[in-house]
Image (cartoon, grey):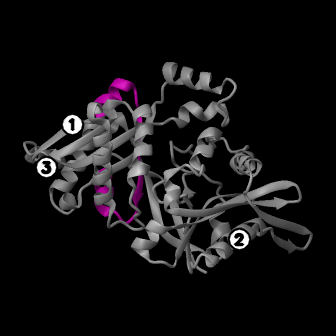
Amino acid sequence: MDRPLSKGDVSLVTRPVLSKADLDTFIRLPGKLHRNDPHWIEPLHLERREHLSSKSPVFAHLKWQAWIAWSGTDPVGRITAQVDTLHRQLHGQDTGHFGMLEAVDDPAVFEILMTTAESWLLEQGARRITGPFNLTINEESGLLVEGFDRPPSAMMGHGLPYYGARVEALGYRPAKDLLAYWMLTDELNFPPALRRMMDRWHDRVRIRPLDRQHFQAEIQLLRDIFNDAWAKNWGFVPFTEAEFEELGKNLKLLVPDDLIYIAEVDGEPSAFIVALPNLNEAIAPLQGRLFPFGWLRLLWRLKVQPPRTARVPLMGVRQTHQHSRLGPVLALRLIEALKPPFVKRGLEALEMSWILESNSGMRNILEHIGAYIYKRYRVYEKQI
C-alpha cells in the first residue's frame, strides 16, 4: 500500500518493492545518490540481487519488507524493515529493525521512510526499532558517522554525512557504536611485554591453516567457535548452519588458504581468524555491472592488479578463554599469523571490523600493535 506525505509543495509517497523492476530500482538507487561521492563503491548488482533473493538462507528466520520513496516519478530514497525471529528469541519479542537506508538530503524523505518502516514494525508487534542492519547484525551494520574520507572495505557500508543528523532529528538515539580499525602491515608490531606473554603460552597454542580436504567440517567448526565467542555480545544473533554453509562457499572461492587460521589450545580448536582480500578495490571501476564485459575486467584486475588491502570480517575466541590470559594470546597469535602471507601477497594494510566500542579488551590489543580507529558506524534505536 502506498503511504503518502504532503508538506507544502512537496508530495512524497512510499511504495513497497513488489516486482523485479521495483527491486532493480531499489538496488540501483544508491549509485545515483552517491554519484558525486569520490569514495563510493557501487556494489555488484548481481550480488545485491542474490543477497535479497528469497532463496537466501537468512529468510528462514527473517520477515522483511522494502520500500522506495518517490517524488513524482523520481525515486528519492529507500528503506527496509525486518523482524528476526532468532533475535526475538534471544532479546525479547518487542524489537524490530530497519536497514538499507539511502535518501536525498531532505527531512521529509527521511520522515516518510522511517515512519513507513515504523508503521510496518508496529503491525509485527514491535515497540522498539534498531538499525540499520542490512539485513542482520551479521551483515552490514550501522550508519557511517565518521570516516567519510575513505572508501569502504568489502562487506562494509558507506553513507553520506547528513544521514545521522536526519535520523536523530526523528527521535532516534545512539544505541551502540561499531568501530573499524586500520593497520599497516609493515607497522604491525608486538611490544616486548606482549611478545613475552605470547611466548609464555607457546607450547600450548598451535596455529594452523584451514584444512581444505575437510572443508565442510572446518566451516562448521568456525561457525561453532563464532557462535560461542559472540553469544554474550550486544545484539548477537547466531549464524545458522545453512547461513554459514553459504558463507563457506564464498570463503572457498574468495579467500586463499593462508588467510584463514585456527588456533588450538592443547589440541582443542578454540579461536579463528579470516582475512578477506578487499574486493572493493577490484569492483570499483565496474559501477555495479558484471555484464556484458565487466566480469572480464574483474578477472583481469584480480589477476594483474590484486587487492592491496584486506579486511578481517570474522574472528572469534571461545568464551572459555575470553577472560583468561589465553584470550589475548590467541587473538595476538592469529593476527601474527597473517603477517607473512600479507607480505608475500603484497597486502599493505588490514581493516579489523567491526569492533564494539565497549569491547575494551579487543580494542586494547589492536591499539597496542599499531592499529587505529579510522571509521565509526552507529546503530540507532527508538521506542515506537
Q: Are marks 3 and 2 in contact (CB under 8 Å)?
A: no
Q: Nearer the viewer, residue 102 or 134?
A: 134
Q: Residue at x 52, y 71 (%)?
A: 174
* Callouts 3 and 1 close, C-beta under 8 Å: no
**Neighbour class for label 3 at 10 Å: few (<14), some, many (≥20)?**
some
Gap between marks 3 and 1 measured at Cα: 20 Å
Is residue 257 inside the magenta stretch?
A: no
**Amino acid at pointer 2:** Thr
Q: Residue at x 42, y 74 (%)?
A: 91
Q: Is residue 127 left or right of residue 347?
A: right
Q: Is residue 164 above or below residue 253?
A: below
Please provide the residue range marked out in magenta: 339-367
Instruction: Work out how far the residue at label 3 is from the one at label 2, CA to CA, in angstroms.
Output: 53 Å
Of the residues shown, which amino acid type is indicated by label 3? Met
SS class of the residue under badge 2?
helix
Q: Is residue 300 left or right of residue 34?
A: left
Which one is in front in this view, the residue at disc 3 or the one at disc 2?
A: 2
First-in-chain label (3 vs 2): 2
Q: What number is the disc on residue 197?
A: 3
Kindly identify which numbered label has been placed on residue 282: none
Reading the image, the residue beneath label 2 is 116
Nearer-the-camera pick, 288 or 93:
93
Residue 204 at x, y = what percent?
A: 9, 46
Residue 107, percent from left and from top: 75, 68
Judged from the image, the secondary structure of the residue bearing numbered disc 1 is strand
Side of 258 relative to 29 (left or right) = left
Comes first in the chain, label 3 or label 1: 3
* Residue 360 located within the stretch drawn in magenta: yes
For disc 1, the marked residue is 208
Q: Amino acid at mark 1?
A: Arg
Could you tell me how far apart the alpha carbons at marks 2 and 1 are, in whole angstroms? Answer: 49 Å
